[in-house]
Image: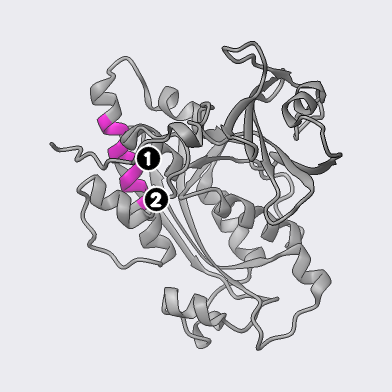
């Protein structure tokens, strides 16, 4: 597996600079720095890649971005154009890369920048959410925990010897977390491989992975009965989904009575699909948001609100 751990820093609009709204809608966040490190097959860290990128849309640094990254306005002029950087990162990545990042936002922002600049149209890569890998394998949690890089470093007893919120150092930290998590799992499960452990967490960022719709039901209509009678389609290809039955014989799990429901489904081409339904807040109407999602981690039925137990931190070295 050609695994590249990537981290981005980006800028956005601010009150002090006016940006054409039509252009802004095409690229909400503009990359100003990209760092990457290769994770070798033996899980050691390999060659590094780092570029500062000069913005062309959001040319004034947002005050919050400046505070977090310690970047200055002057520093935004010390870089290369995105159109030049993209050629370098493609050459560095090589064939069939998997871009791992902390969360899924980096892949989305990278693609939005490519589309805005109309470059790398034929560059295909798969993505991996390293945060989900850490939560699923190191903590044993499949959803709900939005852990920070620093939390994961502390949990795994890894050194914090580099500055945070710099693209290259955050990429190195993420690579260390990913490597340590996989090493621990391979030790406990010697029949597994890196590929088999990561396969459920790899997704295609080029697909439309999520669709949402809002429905308003008339008074007296039972929500679950309505959901049972409705058809659902894959967000990527539009195929009709096959829903998995629950132990009670229906399709829907009630996570919070009268407010939240969940169903597991499968697409013939794109595999597991999550369907979640949430009642609108602060509304007297029976208005519900229905979301279908291709997940970036193994599908698991969420624990209902009534059954949840407090999270207990487990020391991995205990």
Q: Residue 152: x and y, percent?
A: 31, 49
Mark-to-mark CA distance, 2 and 1? 9 Å
* Pick the front one: 72 or 264: 264
Which labelled disc corresponds to residue 134? 1
- Is 112 part of what is drawn in magenta? no
Instruction: Specify whether residue 77 is in view.
Output: yes
How packed is label 1: few (under 14 Cα within 10 Å), some, or many (20 or more)?
many
Q: Residue at x 76, y 51 (%)?
A: 284
Q: Residue 235: x and y, percent?
A: 75, 35
Q: Residue at x 22, y 62 (%)?
A: 161
Vertical placement of 107 versus 55: above or below?
Answer: above
Q: Main secondary structure of the magenta part?
A: helix
The stretch of residues the image draws in magenta is: 174-184
Q: Residue 36: x and y, percent?
A: 45, 54
Q: Give the labeled residue for mark 2.
A: 147
Q: Residue 117: x and y, percent?
A: 74, 63
Which labelled disc corresponds to residue 110? none
Q: Which is nearer the N-term, disc 2 or disc 1?
A: 1
């Amino acid at each position: 597996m050609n695994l590249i751990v990537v981290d981005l820093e980006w800028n956005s609009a601010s009150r002090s600079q006016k940006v054409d709204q039509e252009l802004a809608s095409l690229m909400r966040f503009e990359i100003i720095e990209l760092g990457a490190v290769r994770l070798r097959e033996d899980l050691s860290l390999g060659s590094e890649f780092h570029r500062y990128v000069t913005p062309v849309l959001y040319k004034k640094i947002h005050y919050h971005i400046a505070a977090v990254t310690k970047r200055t306005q002057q520093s935004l002029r010390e870089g290369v154009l995105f159109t030049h950087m993209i050629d370098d990162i493609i050459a560095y990545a090589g064939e069939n890369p998997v871009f791992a990042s902390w969360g899924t936002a980096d892949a989305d922002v990278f693609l939005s920048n490519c589309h805005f600049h109309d470059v790398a149209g034929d560059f295909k890569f798969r993505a991996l959410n390293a945060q989900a890998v850490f939560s699923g394998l190191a903590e044993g949690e499949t959803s709900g925990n939005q852990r920070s890089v620093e939390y994961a470093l502390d949990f795994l007893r890894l050194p914090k010897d580099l500055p945070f919120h710099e693209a290259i150092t955050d990429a190195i930290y993420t690579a260390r977390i990913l490597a340590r998590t996989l090493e621990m799992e391979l030790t406990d499960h010697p029949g597994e491989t890196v590929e088999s452990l990561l396969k459920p967490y790899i997704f295609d960022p080029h697909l439309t992975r999520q669709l949402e719709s809002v429905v308003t039901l008339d008074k007296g209509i039972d929500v679950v009965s309505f959901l049972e009678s409705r058809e659902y389609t894959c967000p990527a290809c539009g195929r009709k989904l096959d829903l998995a039955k629950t132990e009670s014989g229906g399709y829907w799990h009630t996570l919070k009575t009268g407010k939240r429901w969940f169903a597991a489904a499968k697409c013939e081409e794109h595999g597991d699909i999550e369907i979640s339904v949430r009642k609108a807040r602060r509304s007297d109407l029976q208005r519900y948001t229905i979301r279908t999602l291709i997940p970036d981690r193994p599908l698991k039925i969420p624990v209902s609100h009534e059954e949840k137990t407090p999270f207990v931190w487990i020391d991995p070295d205990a």
